[in-house]
Structure formats: C-alpha cells, structure tokens
Amino acid sequence: MAGRHSTWLPFGWLGKKQGASSRNTTESEIVSLSDTTFQISIPACSLLEEVFQRVVRIIAYEDNDAAVIEVGLGGRIDSTNVVTSRVSVLTAVHLEHTEILGETRELIALEKAGIARPGIPFLHGPLAADAMGAVAARAVAEDFPIEEVRVADVVPAGKGIRFSTASGQVIEAGILGEHQAVNLGLAIRAVEVFLG
C-alpha cells in the first residue's frame, strides 16, 4: 500500500485513494465533522450509533477507498451493519453478551454472521462445531462463500509472537497471545481478499 495515506480513528484504519491529497484531516475539521449529524431521523440513537454516524461522515470526507470497521456488539443488529463490505471477518465466537446475542454459541454465531452479504467472502477463525454449523447454514441460506483461516506454529518471539499462515508465510509481530496470531492471520487474509 505504498504511497497511500491513512488516518487513525477509533473504529479502524482508513486508506486514502491513490492520488488524493496527502494532508491529514486537522483536529478542528474532525470536530467540525463530528458536530455535523446526518439529516435522518433516528428515534432512539445510542451513543455508539451516534459516534458511528460521525465516523462514517469522516470516512466519506477523507475520500478513503478502504476502512476497517469493527462491529460493536453482535453483527446482525449492530449499527455498523449498514456498511456493505468487500470482505467480512468473524474472529471467534464465545459465550459473551448472552443476554443480547443468545444463550448458546450457535445463536451467538448466527447473530455475528449477520454481517455477511450474498456473494461477499466471509472469513472466520477456528470455531466450535455448533458455531461452525450455524455459520455454514447461514452461508448456504444467504449465498456467501466462507473460508476458515488458521495459523500454525505459534511461538513466543522476542517481545511478541511468530507464527505461520496457511500459505506458509512466517509472521513475527509485537503482540502477545495465540488468539492474536489468529486475529493477525485473519487480518492478513482479509487484505489479500480485499486487494484481489
């Protein structure tokens, strides 16, 4: 991605379109954009939904051709679900937020797979059988391709970890924990899919 500009925002990474101005958006411009709300009526908008609206406005202002947007909670009912992507990623399914997402891994996986779109690649990390079954059933019903991304040979390396991707690429990164190796492996694969 040499020659591209990126801007950091709490919701992810933005890559400027090639040939676009290389200047960063100033703090006062971000404040100004953040104070501008969409001209739509939302009866009960949560703070996260309001922040997401503002982030989308900044993304549009920055003329970016890529943004990494992390779902806040779940997927199907999350405000980020209004975004159409070129690749979707599910890192893991755990028994968390069960009062909102459901009492089982299967129900939680169905909610999280709600970010998927027909025809758009859906990448996921290793899933328990019940969660995998739910994702696979949704993929068939909604016609999207799924791909499990695994990493191997995760070992401590200096102040981080080293691991291998499925394609045999050896990655060393300054992050700790086997789950972070899976997350980074998913991120690498998502970029590969995005770039085609």
Image: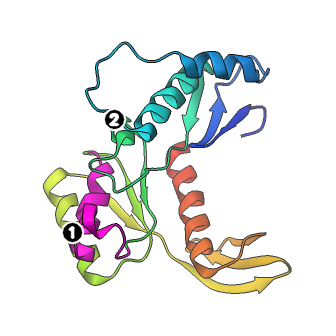
Quarter of the image with the N terminus is top right
Q: Residue furthest left?
A: 141
Element at badge 2?
A: helix
- Which one is in front, 114 or 165? 114
Give me the disc on residue 169. Answer: none
User: Do tag 2 and tag 1 residues touch (Cβ < 8 Å)?
Assistant: no
Element at badge 1?
A: helix
Q: Is residue 156 above or below residue 189?
A: below
Q: Position of residue 137 (x, y in %)?
A: 17, 66
Q: Is 38 situated left or right of 42 in this image?
A: right
For the stretch drawn in magenta, what is the main secondary structure?
A: helix
Q: Residue at x 38, y 38 (%)?
A: 46
- Which one is in front, 122 or 70? 70
Give me the disc on residue 107. Answer: 1
**Magenta stretch bounds:** 94-117
- Structural crowding at the residue carrying mark 1, measured as other residues with C-alpha within 10 Å and reported as few (<14), some (14–19) or many (≥20): some
Distance in Å between CA atoms under marks 2 and 1: 21 Å
Q: Amino acid at mark 1?
A: Leu
- Structural crowding at the residue carrying mark 2, measured as other residues with C-alpha within 10 Å and reported as few (<14), some (14–19) or many (≥20): few
Image quarter for residue 181? bottom right
Q: From this viewpoint, is residue 144 visible?
A: yes
Q: From this viewpoint, is residue 196 visible?
A: no
Task: Say if the magenta span includes residue 105.
Answer: yes
Q: Which of the two discs, 2 and 1, labels the residue nearer the N terminus?
A: 2
Q: Residue at x 77, y 38 (%)?
A: 2
Q: Position of residue 108 (x, y in %)?
A: 27, 67
Q: Is residue 14 above or below residue 179?
A: above
- Residue hosting label 2: 82
Q: Residue furthest right?
A: 158
Q: Amino acid at mark 2?
A: Val
